[in-house]
Image (spheres, rainbow, N blue to C red):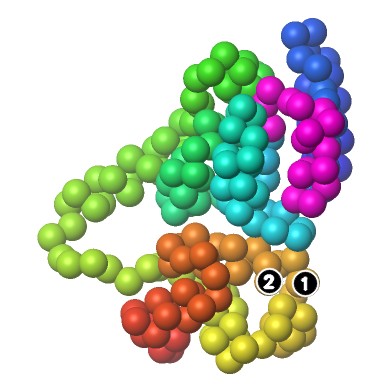
């Protein structure tokens, strides 16, 4: 529904040409060589893969495409990670039509665009790190993320985790993607290593 609403909104702009939409990372990779968009609006939370993984792959294989992260996550770790991957824009899904169109035009013109909310989040993180006099601090994860992490360490599958926590498999994958970003790792082995290093599984 969100994608369809977005399509309707963008098609109303006379200087935009809507190339298409895809619901998964796999479908996106199949569509891009055919549609060849100037700007790709990319959600971080995809059913089959993390949008971060897809962004990293596209930066290598299709460097000419400008990528705008369009997500509900206003989290410093997500923002900094996406920007570090070479994504040119970062917008939250609650943005208005005017800002969305402005951001798309900025990327098409070779510029970058980060929403004010996301910019404020990064600045708060920067100030916090500058003012911190202590040594490295453990990653901050939510109670639910800790529950998912504990089950991952116990070698449970996504389906098993979903069953134990009474949530959907897609929700489990979203928590997994959040943990990868917050712990600064690329796979489950790295996740387990950092969890044990910082003793993140304690109650």
The residue at which mark 2 appears reads as 172
Residue 18: image location, x then y, percent:
82, 23
The residue at which mark 1 appears reads as 168
**Is residue 96 left or right of 47 when viewed as pictured?**
left
Please state which of residues 155 and 170 is positioned toward the viewer in this rendering: 155
Q: Residue at x 58, y 91 (%)?
A: 154
Please state which of residues 151 and 194 is positioned toward the viewer in this rendering: 194
The quarter of the picture where residue 42 lies is top right
The quarter of the picture where residue 77 lies is bottom left
**Is residue 152 left or right of 137 when viewed as pictured?**
right
Residue 117: image location, x then y, percent:
47, 36
Q: Is residue 103 above or below residue 121?
A: above
Is residue 140 something one can see in this rendering? Answer: yes
Q: Count all numbered tags in the image, as a single digit.
A: 2
Query: From this viewpoint, which residue is outermost toward the front?
Result: 61
For the C terminus, the quadrant is: bottom left
Is residue 44 something one can see in this rendering? Answer: no
Residue numbers of the magenta segment: 25-40
Q: Is residue 157 above or below residue 120?
A: below
Secondary structure beneath disc 1?
loop
**Is residue 180 left or right of 132 when viewed as pictured?**
right
Q: Is residue 39 magenta?
A: yes
Assess whether mark 2 and mark 1 are in contact (beta carbons under 8 angstroms): yes
Q: Residue at x 63, y 22 (%)?
A: 104
Residue 137: image location, x then y, percent:
27, 68
Q: Is residue 120 above or below residue 77?
A: above
Rounded to the nearest angstrom, the CA distance separating label 1 from label 2 is 7 Å
Secondary structure beneath disc 2?
helix
Query: From this viewpoint, which residue is outermost toward the left?
Result: 133
């Amino acid at each position: 529904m969100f994608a369809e609403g977005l399509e309707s909104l963008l098609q109303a702009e006379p200087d935009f040409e809507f190339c298409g939409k895809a619901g998964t990372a796999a479908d996106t990779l199949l569509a891009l060589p055919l549609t060849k968009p100037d700007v790709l609006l990319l959600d971080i939370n995809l059913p089959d893969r993390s949008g971060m993984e897809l962004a990293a792959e596209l930066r290598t294989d299709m460097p000419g495409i400008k990528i705008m992260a369009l997500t509900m996550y206003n989290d410093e770790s997500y923002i900094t990670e996406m920007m570090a991957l070479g994504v040119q824009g970062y917008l939250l899904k609650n943005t208005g039509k005017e800002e969305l169109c402005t951001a798309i035009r900025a990327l098409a013109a070779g510029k970058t665009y980060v929403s004010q909310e996301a910019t404020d989040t990064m600045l708060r993180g920067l100030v916090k790190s500058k003012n911190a006099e202590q040594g490295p601090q453990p990653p901050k994860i939510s109670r639910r993320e800790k529950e998912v992490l504990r089950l991952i360490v116990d070698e449970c599958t996504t389906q098993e985790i979903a069953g134990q926590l009474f949530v959907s498999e897609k929700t489990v994958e979203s928590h997994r993607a959040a943990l990868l970003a917050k712990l600064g790792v690329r796979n489950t082995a790295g996740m387990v290593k950092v969890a044990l290093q910082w003793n993140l599984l304690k109650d």
